[in-house]
Image (cartoon, grey):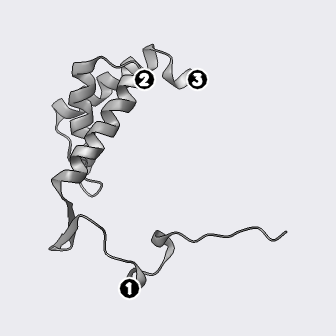
Amino acid sequence: MTPLITVGVGDAPPSLRPPLPFANQDSGLIHIMPEINIELTLAFQQALLGAGVPVNLAQQAAGIMAKDDPHAPHLGRSDEDMHIVRSAHTWMRAKGFFNR
């Protein structure tokens, strides 16, 4: 039996990649529309809650992570943002999430 080989869209040359849904190009940067940020925030929040992070902290950290900018230093996070995300990570570690 021949193994099935799949190639993802990200593997295609840039000229052959389809445009990203819910995104637009502005000065070479892609800005994701608010609908995606809401879905991303909810997904992060659900994951953090499932890992034992308290509700208020999970909401704050999820909102920060959903707007991360991979091209900015420290993902575009302020010192306060970084403190909140580190606090969520600390809760996850304390609840044994990384030992599962």
Please state which amino acid type lies under the numbered disc 2: Ala
Q: Which residue is mark 3?
A: 100
Inspect the image, locate mark 1, and give the three-letter code of the amino acid beneath it: Ser
Q: Residues within 10 Å of mark 1 (few under 14, many from 20)?
A: few
Quarter that holds the C terminus: top right
Give how far across and how far down residue 41 sits, in percent: 26, 40
How far, Cα to Cα, is label 1 from label 2? Answer: 40 Å
Using the rendered view, name the quadrant where residue 70 is placed.
bottom left
Q: Is residue 71 above or below residue 93?
A: below
Callout 1: helix, strand or loop? helix
Q: Name the side, left or right, on which 95 lies relative to 86.
A: right
Question: Residue 3, percent across and down?
Answer: 76, 67
The answer to which quarter of the image holds residue 45 is top left
CA gap, disc 1 to disc 3? 42 Å
Residue type pointed to by label 3: Arg
Q: Going by the picture, which residue comes out furthest to the bottom?
A: 15
Question: Image point 50% across, 17% down: which residue?
Answer: 96
Residue annotated with mark 1: 15
Q: Earlier in the sequence, mark 3 or mark 2?
A: 2
Residue at figure coordinates x 47%, y 72% from the top left: 9
Q: Earlier in the sequence, mark 1 or mark 3?
A: 1
Residue 12, above or below 43: below
Query: Residue 12: x, y in percent?
Result: 48, 78
**Residue beneath label 2, please?**
51
Report crowding for label 2: few under 14, some 14 to 19, many 20 or more residues within 10 A (C-alpha).
many
- Which quadrant of the structure image shows residue 58? top left
